[in-house]
C-alpha cells in the first residue's frame, strides 16, 4: 500500500451520508488541504482502499455490521496502515476494546458530533505525521549506519572506539583483523584482554591504557608514530591518532585510529637515500668540473710535450722508459677525470682499512 501524498491529506469517510457532509464541512473550514470521499458501505470502503492511498479512514459502527473488530481487521488486512477511527454510540465497551485491539486508532462514544470527529482526525493525523517522521529518521539512520559501516570497513586504517573502562564500543574490520577476529567478536571486550592473548608485554599494555586515560581526562589529542617489534622480530611502524569524543548519551570515549605506515617509512627512507646520493653526486660533479677546468688543460699540454720527447729521434735513449711512465701516468689522470664526470651511482671501497674512497674501477 502506498503512502498518501504529503501535499494533500485524503480522508475516506465510511459513515452515514448526512454525517459525512457535516464532517466534510468542518474539515474544509480548516487550513489543511483535505480531499474527502464518502463510502456508503464496507464493500465500497474496501474497493476505494485498493484504488488509492489514504491519509485516514473513519468507520461508523452501524455500517460495519454486527462485528466491528472484523471490519477493522478486514481493512487492516488490505495493507492499510494509516489512522483508522471507529465511531458509534451502540458499540459497547467490550466490542470497542476488541476493535481497538484489531487496529482501530480511536473510538468515539458520540457519532453525531462532526466537530469531535474532525478533532479526532486532526489529532490522529498529527500523530501519524510524527510516526512517519520517526520512521523516516530511523530509515535514514539505518542507511547512514550501513554507509558508515561500509566506509570504515573499506579503509585500511584500524578504527576503534573505547569507553572510559577501555571496553570496545565500535571497531572496523581492519582493527578486528589484527586479532584474527571479526568486528562483531571484539565489541564489548577490553583491549587489554586482546593484547594479553597476543603476548604483548604488560608494560606496553599499561602504557596504552594510561594514554587512553590521559586523552579522556585532559581532553588532549595524541598524534604520533610508534615503532613496534612483533614476536617474529619484524619491526613495523604505526601512525596513531587518539582523540576524545562524546556520544549522543553524553558518554566520553576515545576514538583511536592506527595506520600501518611501514611501507611508507621504507619508501621515505629510500627517497632520503636517493636524495643523499643525488646530493653527493652533485658535489662530486661540481668538484670534477673544477678539476677538469684546472687540470685538464695543463695536463693536455704536458701529455703533448711528453709525446714530442718520445718521438724525438735524437733524444737520450736512457730517458725513454721514464717518458713512457710519465705519459701513462698523465693518461691515468685524464681517465680518472673522465670517470668522475660520467659517475652516476657513487660506490666506495676501503682504503688502508680506515678511509672510504670512491670506487672508479669498471671491473669491480
Image: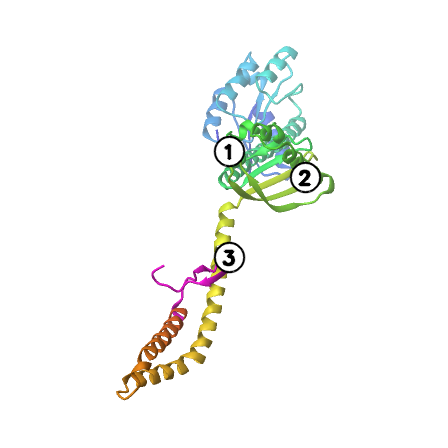
Structural crowding at the residue carrying mark 2, measured as other residues with C-alpha within 10 Å and reported as few (<14), some (14–19) or many (≥20): some
User: Which residue corresponds to mark 1?
Assistant: 177
Assess whether mark 1 and mark 2 are in contact (beta carbons under 8 angstroms): no
- Magenta region: which residues? 341-364
The secondary element bearing badge 3 is classed as helix
As rendered, which of 251 and 160 lies closer to the eye? 160
Distance from label 2 to label 1 (Cα)?
23 Å
Q: Residue at x 40, y 82 (%)?
A: 297
- Asked if residue 342 is among those painted magenta in the image, a careful observer would answer yes
- The label on residue 211 is 2
Instruction: Tell me if 317 is positioned left or right of 254 in this view.
Output: left
In which quadrant will I find the C terminus? bottom left
Between discs 3 and 2, the one toward the N terminus: 2
Q: Is residue 241 visible?
A: yes
As rendered, which of 263 and 149 lies closer to the eye? 263
Query: Which residue reaches farthest right?
Result: 218
- Asked if residue 78 is among those painted magenta in the image, a careful observer would answer no
- The label on residue 210 is none
As rendered, which of 16 and 137 lies closer to the eye? 137
Q: Percent x, y for residue 328?
A: 34, 74
Q: Quadrant of residue 349?
A: bottom left
Q: Percent x, y for residue 219?
A: 71, 43
Residue 21, compared with residue 283, is above or below; it is above
Q: Percent x, y for residue 100?
A: 61, 17
Query: Which residue reaches farthest left?
Result: 313
Amino acid at each position: 500500500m502506498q503512502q498518501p501524498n504529503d501535499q494533500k491529506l485524503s480522508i475516506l469517510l465510511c459513515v452515514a451520508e448526512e454525517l459525512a457532509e457535516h464532517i466534510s464541512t468542518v474539515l474544509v473550514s480548516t487550513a489543511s488541504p483535505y480531499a474527502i470521499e464518502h463510502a456508503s458501505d464496507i464493500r465500497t470502503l474496501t474497493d476505494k482502499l485498493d484504488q488509492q492511498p489514504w491519509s485516514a479512514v473513519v468507520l461508523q459502527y452501524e455500517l460495519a455490521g454486527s462485528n466491528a473488530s472484523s471490519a477493522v481487521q478486514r481493512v487492516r488486512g488490505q495493507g492499510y496502515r494509516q489512522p483508522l477511527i471507529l465511531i458509534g454510540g451502540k458499540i459497547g465497551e467490550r466490542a470497542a476494546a476488541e476493535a481497538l485491539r484489531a487496529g482501530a486508532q480511536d473510538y468515539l462514544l458520540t457519532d453525531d458530533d462532526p466537530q469531535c470527529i474532525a478533532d479526532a482526525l486532526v489529532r490522529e493525523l498529527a500523530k501519524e505525521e510524527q510516526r512517519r517522521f520517526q520512521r523516516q529518521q530511523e530509515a535514514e539512520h539505518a542507511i547512514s549506519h550501513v554507509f558508515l559501516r561500509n566506509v570504515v570497513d573499506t579503509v585500511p586504517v584500524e578504527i576503534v572506539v573505547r569507553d572510559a573502562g577501555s571496553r570496545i564500543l565500535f571497531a572496523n574490520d581492519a582493527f578486528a583483523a589484527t586479532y584474527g577476529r571479526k568486528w562483531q567478536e571484539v565489541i564489548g571486550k577490553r583491549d587489554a584482554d586482546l593484547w594479553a592473548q597476543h603476548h604483548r608485554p604488560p608494560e606496553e599494555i599499561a602504557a596504552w591504557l594510561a594514554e587512553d586515560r590521559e586523552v579522556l581526562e585532559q581532553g588532549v589529542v595524541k598524534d604520533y608514530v610508534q615503532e613496534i617489534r612483533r614476536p617474529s622480530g619484524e619491526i613495523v611502524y604505526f601512525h596513531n591518532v587518539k582523540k576524545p569524543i562524546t556520544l549522543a548519551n553524553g558518554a566520553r570515549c576515545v576514538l583511536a585510529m592506527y595506520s600501518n605506515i611501514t611501507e611508507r617509512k621504507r619508501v621515505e627512507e629510500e627517497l632520503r637515500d636517493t636524495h643523499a646520493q643525488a646530493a653527493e653526486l652533485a658535489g662530486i660533479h661540481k668538484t670534477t668540473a673544477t678539476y677538469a677546468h684546472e687540470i685538464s688543460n695543463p695536463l693536455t699540454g704536458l701529455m703533448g710535450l711528453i709525446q714530442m720527447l718520445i718521438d724525438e729521434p735524437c733524444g737520450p735513449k736512457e730517458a725513454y722508459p721514464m717518458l713512457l711512465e710519465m705519459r701513462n701516468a698523465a693518461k691515468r689522470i685524464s681517465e680518472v677525470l673522465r670517470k668522475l664526470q660520467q659517475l652516476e651511482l657513487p660506490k666506495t671501497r676501503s682504503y688502508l682499512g680506515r678511509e672510504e674512497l670512491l670506487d672508479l674501477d669498471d671491473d669491480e
